[in-house]
Image (cartoon, rainbow, N blue to C red):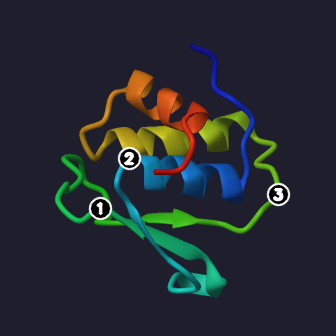
């Protein structure tokens, strides 16, 4: 599956579909944070995902990095990409 082009709004929707809670303006510089209530990252990663405010993340490398951060919480790439397509639960 190809990596979709997305911005802050779409990544928040994806994270909510995967069970994350979005904490608004809690990160450095007013960025939002996403925390999962039960899952913890299995790599050397912070226990949250920082979501920069942007209409669209133009860098393909940055989008891959965001998806890898979500995968570190135990989700597969397929689950992450499918969460982009679902409506918010």
In contact (CB < 8 Å): disc 3 and disc 1: no
Q: Is mark 2 on a helix, strand or loop?
A: loop
Q: Is residue 50 above or below residue 12?
A: below
Q: Which residue is label 3 attached to?
A: 55
Q: Which residue is label 1 attached to?
A: 36
**What label does residue 70 carry, if any?**
none
Measure the alpha-carbon separation of dots 1 and 2.
9 Å
Mark 3 or mark 2, earlier in chain: 2
Q: Is residue 1 above or below residue 24?
A: above
Left or right: 11 as drawn, with respect to 54: left
Image point (58%, 85%), residue name: 25
Relative image position of residue 47 (x, y in whole percent): 28, 66
Instruction: Say which of marks 1 and 2 sits in front.
Output: 2
Q: Which residue is label 2 attached to?
A: 18
**Looking at the image, which is closer to me, 67 or 84?**
84
Image point (34%, 54%), residue name: 19
Task: Give the quarter of the image for residue 30.
Answer: bottom right
Q: Is residue 37 above or below residue 57?
A: below
Measure the alpha-carbon separation of dots 3 and 2.
21 Å
Relative image position of residue 39 (x, y in whole percent): 19, 54
């Amino acid at each position: 599956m190809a990596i979709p082009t997305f911005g802050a709004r779409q990544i928040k929707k994806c994270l909510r579909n995967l069970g994350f809670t979005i904490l608004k303006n809690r990160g450095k510089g007013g960025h939002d944070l996403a925390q999962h209530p039960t899952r913890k990252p299995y790599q050397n990663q912070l226990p949250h995902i920082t979501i920069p405010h942007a209409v669209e993340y133009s860098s393909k490398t940055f989008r891959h990095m965001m998806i890898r951060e979500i995968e570190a919480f135990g989700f597969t790439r397929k689950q992450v990409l499918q969460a982009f397509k679902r409506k918010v639960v």
